[in-house]
Image (cartoon, rainbow, N blue to C red):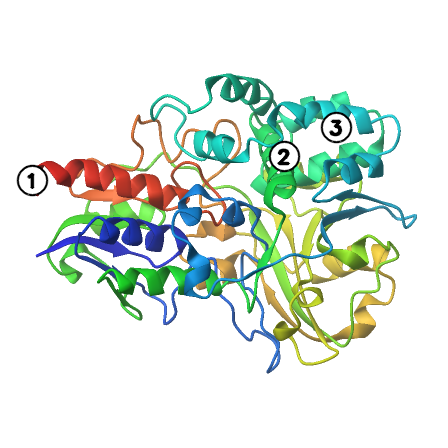
Amino acid sequence: MLDAVVIGAGPNGLTAAVELARRGMSVEVFEAQDTIGGGARTEELTLPGFRHDPCSAVHPLAAGSPAFAAMDLERYGLQWLHPDLPLAHPFPDGTAAVLARSVGETAMSLGVHDAGTYRRLLAPFIGKWDTLAADFLRTQWLGLPRDPVTYARFGLAAAQPAALLNRRFRDQKARGLFAGLAAHVIAPLSSPGTGGAAIMFALAAHAGGWPIPRGGSQAIPDALAALLRLHGGAVHTGYEVKRLDDLPPARAYVFDTSPTALARIAGLGNAYRGVRYGPGVFKIDYALSGPVPWTSAAARRAGTVHLGPTSGEIGTALRAAADGRAPSVPFLITSQPSLTDPTRAPEGKHTFWVYGHVPHGWEGDATDAVERQLERFAPGFRDLVLARAVAGPPQLAARNANYVGGDICAGSAAGLGLVIRPKLARVPYTTAHPAVFLCSQSAPPGPGVHGMSGHHAARAVWSRLRPTR
């Protein structure tokens, strides 16, 4: 009998498997798709030689993850590449706010009225990423924080909605940049905790950048799988699990799936009937004949580019998606990996990645709305398009079953959804079945390629199984 079986080979499932295997447990992973990775895959979606990331592409939380840092994944092929600028937030006049590695450069881009405000907002946390990440990338009631004073100070700011924190700034550049950072959790800017998400993303940039893996996001799960095999674990792909009887006998079953899939497979009935899923996204991967012709010089140097531009436009787009309306002017999160990693496209050509927010399960086509927004900041963009791969919520859910209705956060982040997920529980990684555990991003700390949900789930498994070993 195996000690543990992991269902799903995404970053969290593989992290849980590695941590259990390193403790001497026998572990096997079963993945329904033909390749591992979950939301961190790399494929030729458009034309030969153009390597795209179907979901996650830029990884500030992976580069700063306590779980990944303890694994030394660089020894197993993961190489981080840093763009000149982590993020640019351009405006139609060609200017831009930027999120740079330097706090000073970032503050200066916000203008004289808001530079000091930005510095004061982040000053208590600069240089404290390691303890801050360990304290907040977890369930908040899972033991005492390492740094209680910093934890309390951050918590007071982090609990606030981004819309409220944004009132500290006077001008649109700072407000737009901050709103764009908060929008990564795909919730209205009035939702509690969105301010904390924005601060966390900014701190991640100042501590470790917003890098991409050389060769694509697939490098992250590939490194995890290599480490797992080194410790005696095994990975099986193309193996769809419909019920627990499909799996070999084990003392623990660890699910890197949505809570609803866990309940169905494990026979837990309506255990997660109250789980809410959030808005979906509409994503396009492009093969381009040249670099994106941004009017902003900063955008031409950045790995990630946000297209809002104002906090008002961003808030309107997010609210529309949450209310079931497709925004006519979407807020776009874009990535241009081939600027930093030439292996991602044939010589002289480029890959480009973009998504906007749409209602849950939306079946429409937002291509024209997306490209109108791109042309607004990069006139002539359409002339460079060699091919595009379009994926709305149904297509994203087909690629990855965890993205129910196209929700790439695997659970709504609105309200208290960033803290209480998938439902209120002291240890949300355990279930009503003593041998079944949840390790996906549907559990705290939630969305992002950081492996921390898998890390904490592995601790829960170990705590339950250790006394009988």
State the CA–CA distance, disc 2 to disc 1: 43 Å
The three-letter amino acid code for the residue at tag 3 is: Tyr
Number of residues whose C-alpha sits closer than 10 Å to that of mark 2, classed few (under 14), some (14–19) or many (20 or more) = many
Viewer-side label of 2, 1: 1
Specify the quadrant of the image occupied by residue 377.
bottom right
Q: Residue at x 57, y 47 (%)?
A: 60
**Is the residue marked by circle 1 packed among few (<14), some (14-19), or many (20+) residues within 10 Å?**
few
Q: Quadrant of residue 338?
A: bottom right
Residue at x 42% of width, y 25% of height: 146
Percent from the top left, x then y, of residue 156? 57, 17
Q: Which residue is mark 2?
A: 198
Instruction: Report the Cα–Cα distance between label 1 and label 3.
Output: 52 Å
x and y percentages locating residue 120 in the rendered image: 72, 22
Q: Which mark is residue 320?
A: none
Q: Quadrant of residue 369?
A: bottom right
Please say whether residue 204 is visible from this viewpoint.
Answer: yes
**Lower sequence index among marks 3 and 2:** 3
- Quarter of the image where the N terminus is located: bottom left
Residue 248 x/y as whole percent: 13, 61
Vertically, is 264 above or below 446? below
Q: Residue furthest right?
A: 93
Foreground residue among 269 and 70: 70
Q: Amino acid at mark 1?
A: Thr
Give the residue pinned by disc 3.
Answer: 118
x 56%, y 66%: residue: 214
Task: Say which residue label 1 marks.
Answer: 468
Helix, strand or loop status at disc 1: helix
